Image (cartoon, rainbow, N blue to C red):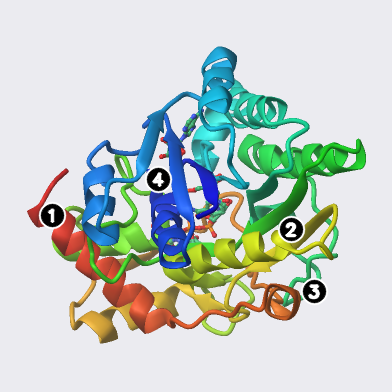
Amino acid sequence: MAKILVTGGMGYIGSHTVVELVNSGYEPVIVDDLSNSHPKILEQLTKIIGYKPIFHQVDLCDEKAVANLVATENDIAGIIHFAAFKAVGESVQHPLKYYRNNFYSLINLLNGYYGKSVNFVFSSSCTVYGQPEQLPVTEDAPVQPAQSPYGNTKQVAEEILKDMVASGSNYKVISLRYFNPVGAHESALIGELPIGVPQNLVPFITQTAIGKREKITVFGDTYNTPDGSCIRDYIHVVDLAKAHVSALKLAEKDSFTGYDVFNLGTGKGSSVLEVIAAFEQTTGVKLNYQIGPPRPGDVEQVWGDVTKSSEKLGWKTELGLDVMMSSAWEWEKYINQNPL
Ligand code: NAD
Ligand code: WQD
């Protein structure tokens, strides 16, 4: 069984990817400092996959700790690098916190495994496109000046990875630009765990539905879109997780060399009001929502062209907005009754 280092494997997308790696016959090795995840996720993963996965509690910004990790885990075939801070608003308030964590962790990891033949899959984001001129947006669309330090870390990390490949290191690298991951595993044992007030749409919807929040505000209904609210490409986190397995399989091929980048979305946009309607319809729960002013810095509409991903990764999404909503709701109910 090929061992795959999963940094940030206790987090939202990482934990779902651990499950899909096991389903595909890989052995995940989780590395996480638990700065944005809960230690009990390991027990939850154990319940899903049937055994306790290897877990190293390591802060990837700690160079010595990474050197020890590399010495211990010296026979890995690949790395999926999820570990990063991801709150856009917080990155504007505390840019150095974001530059430090997202760059030090990447650099220490690349330095630690330098020279070894390791396939490297990186969590990038559709945030690199800003508001694209053409929709759906393709991978060769221009990267826009970053709107936040967080977005900047994704753009620069992609450049760092390209430079690594160009320098003649043994790394093969695939950057995956996620659109909007939502939903949870069908077991409802893992899902998104926002700390404090959620900034993202779907956790805010489920927390409002369960009564943790009084109401949800739709950030603007006068955009130049069919119903006036913003449009995004929501993707089920399990479909997203499976794409990481496909990326590893592509990188394993002798014919794959160097660096490539792929959009991970459904290829279809949904408006905020459509997401709310889908939630109400799928779950039968009425949402208390109001229309409010636009959120500063929001992109009006973006969805991805996923032709390249489907052709080269041999991957496509299987789960629609209904399953995204129902699984997010099952997870919210579970976590409300079984707090970690
Ligand atoms: P998450 O916060 O749930 O998971 C990230 C994990 O990394 C957490 O468990 C955290 O404890 C860990 N971590 C952070 N810094 C670390 C460090 N220095 N050392 C070790 N572990 C560390 O986030 P997520 O939503 O699962 O996102 C995973 C990746 O995907 C991130 O790189 C994020 O930027 C990217 N991404 C997320 C989204 C999204 O909407 N969730 C969209 C696009 C890209
Ligand atoms: C989705 C839509 C809001 C909350 C963020 C990051 C981006 C990437 C994906 C990491 C928007 C609207 C939201 C609410 C609302 N992450 N909304 N009421 O803004 O597309 O992107 O996640 O790389 O970098 O910025 O996601 O979930 O915050 O918002 O009306 O209470 O929901 O205006 O149109 P977003 P989101």
Q: Give above or below for 62 relative to 330.
A: above
The residue pinned by badge 2 equals 129
Residue type at numbered disc 1: Asn
Q: Looking at the rendering, in which quadrant would you find the C terminus?
A: top left
Crowd around label 3: few <14 · some 14–19 · many ≥20 (10 Å): few
Residue type at numbered disc 2: Tyr
Q: Tell me the residue at 63%/54% (across/down).
A: 125
Q: Return the disc, 2 or 3, that comes first in the chain's sequence.
A: 2
Q: CA distance from mark 3 to mark 4?
A: 32 Å
The residue pinned by badge 3 equals 134
Crowd around label 1: few <14 · some 14–19 · many ≥20 (10 Å): few
Expressed as whole percent of the image width and height from the top left, the position of residue 264 reads: 62, 67
Expressed as whole percent of the image width and height from the top left, the position of residue 200 reads: 42, 55
Residue type at numbered disc 3: Gln
The residue pinned by badge 1 equals 336
Seen from the viewer's position, the closer of residues 267 and 28 is 28
In the image, 232: left or right of 185? right
Q: CA distance from mark 1 to mark 2?
A: 36 Å
Crowd around label 4: few <14 · some 14–19 · many ≥20 (10 Å): many
Residue type at numbered disc 4: Gly
Q: Give above or below for 23 relative to 213.
A: below
Task: For residue 215, say whether it is visible.
Answer: no
